[in-house]
Image: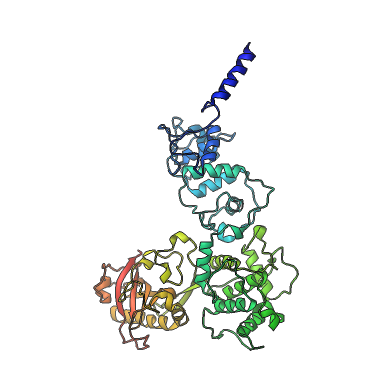
Amino acid sequence: MKKISIAVLLCVVLVMGTVTAFGEISFPDLPETHWAYDAVNQLVEEKTVSGTPEGTFEPNRLVTRAEFVRMIGKIDQKRESDFVDVSPEHWGYEYIMYSGVQGDENNCFYPDEPMTRGDVVTILWNRAGNPKGIAAPSVITDQAENKDAVAWIYMYGVMIGNDGINLRLEDGISRAEVASLIIRSRAIDVNAQPKEFSSMVSDDILKKIFNSTALFDREYDPNATVTNGELARAAVRLASEENKLTYSKFSVQIPFEHEYAKDLYVLGQNCLGEEVINEAFIDQPANNQDMIAALTFGMIKKAHSKIGYDTTSTCYADVGEMNKNIAYTCLTYANKKDVALYSNRNIRPGQTATMHDIALVLLQLDHLIGSQSAFTTAWNENEAIGVYDMSLEQNAKNYPETSQYFRCILEDMPSDIYAVQFFKMPAFAESAERNPVDIYHFSREFASMFVSRLNQETKRIHDELGIDVQFTYYSSLVTNNGNGFTCRVKLDVKNMNGKSGTYQELFKTTDGQDQTLADGTTLFIDVSLDYALSSDPSMPVIYGPAILKVK
């Protein structure tokens, strides 16, 4: 009779579809159409998720550390000692003690603090057995100390970020996102091929990178190809930091009549080899191998910091035998720095390069070296005018609404730099050749004139005011004000030398909020050179308001 009763009871349950018996959920704030519904449902079945006392799930709320370790479930081994900040009476005590998560140097767990995306990556990786040896581009792995964990979670598509580049590992993470990541991480087949990097990055950010570098005379089209001649010009432009090329860095000949003949000669002599300098090669579509070699050559040639070559490095596994020329050196450098297009650090060398591929390589090289330059003035007699490399902003969310008025948006720059109108001109003028984007090539290629004039101003400030300051000049932050040029620069106060005063007092400006100056003060300001970059230091520099005080 007992067996019959159980069978009958089971039939009743199946017919009625009891909610709690099979873990089905009916959170009012998580409908079946929600993207995380199935993942949350599975965790409910495992009884690691039960919702709030009010019966909701709160999918968009940031998950706490205690909530996360409950959602992920227990391991077999219990921690030997309690955390300082987690008592046995805490609701998550058992889950925390069986989580395998270590505390900080003070033996604290911080159960009520938000869990970061980076911590989630590390814990999921640990639960998966700490898989190693997964190749991922350095633009991804450089985002975390634990490169193996980031490579694993990214290349298997568990976490790729909204744009396929920025994992935002310092940010908090929502309860819905955590549920989805837990389930996806468990579904990874370690024997499966990792995802292709070329398919994971947002086309929006690739378009921004491609157009910002301004190496080609065509706008970004992901499926378009380029000729070897166009590639050669792009590489020489990158190496020279010039749009209208003077070829001043290279010895040039014209081997035959063609628009790109000089460029191909330079690239052949300095990178790809003399055998490519011919009329048959110049109009052929560029392939991935030559594209990566040429752009790497251009970026290294442009770099203002020392780039080390490792002669023991190996070339890409899918590149066949080739001459040990500069192209080979560039390819081995790119391979060692984890520049790739496809999984397992492959590049498919003979495949025709598209603008999508070119933008993806530029993005990675820009991350490694920096495709832009900033110039600093000499703030004392022992210093010289300096130059350093800067990268483009690679997070599309950080592009301001005004980005169309600038040739490029620089990484790690305050957003107000691009939001506030330039001194002595209307905000983002409609007239031609007034905005920074319109005169970018001029302000970059004649940067030495701007920096020289600012350097004279640095000396004048020391001689007349008795303080030491340094200007930083950015070619992408110069506009035509109608009488000359206005540069948005960084002003670093190096040494007040016992002097005191405010920005307005010392620099004779009455616009904007005043700032007291002290050693270490950093301001972003506008300076107008209204006498067409006159070399005469007696010609005044007109100071605009302080845009932003950094510290």
Residue 167 placement (x, y as % from top left):
51, 54
- The residue depicted at 41 percent of the width and 77 percent of the height is 377
Q: Look at the image and tell me in which quarter the N terminus lies.
A: top right
- The residue positioned farthest toward the top in the image shown: 1
**Percent from the top left, x then y, of residue 269?**
66, 82
Say how the picture is coloured. Answer: rainbow
Residue placed at 46% from the left, 30% from the top?
A: 88
Image coordinates of residue 378 in percent, x first then y, are 41, 78
* Left or right, 478 with reference to 2: left
Above or below 11: residue 191: below
Q: Is residue 520 above or below residue 153?
A: below
Q: Nearer the viewer, residue 268 or 543?
A: 268
Left or right, residue 55 beside residue 466 = right
Residue 241, visible in the rendered structure: yes
Total numbered labels: 0
Residue 310 visible? The answer is no
Say which quadrant the C terminus sits in.
bottom left
Q: Is residue 294 above or below residue 5?
A: below
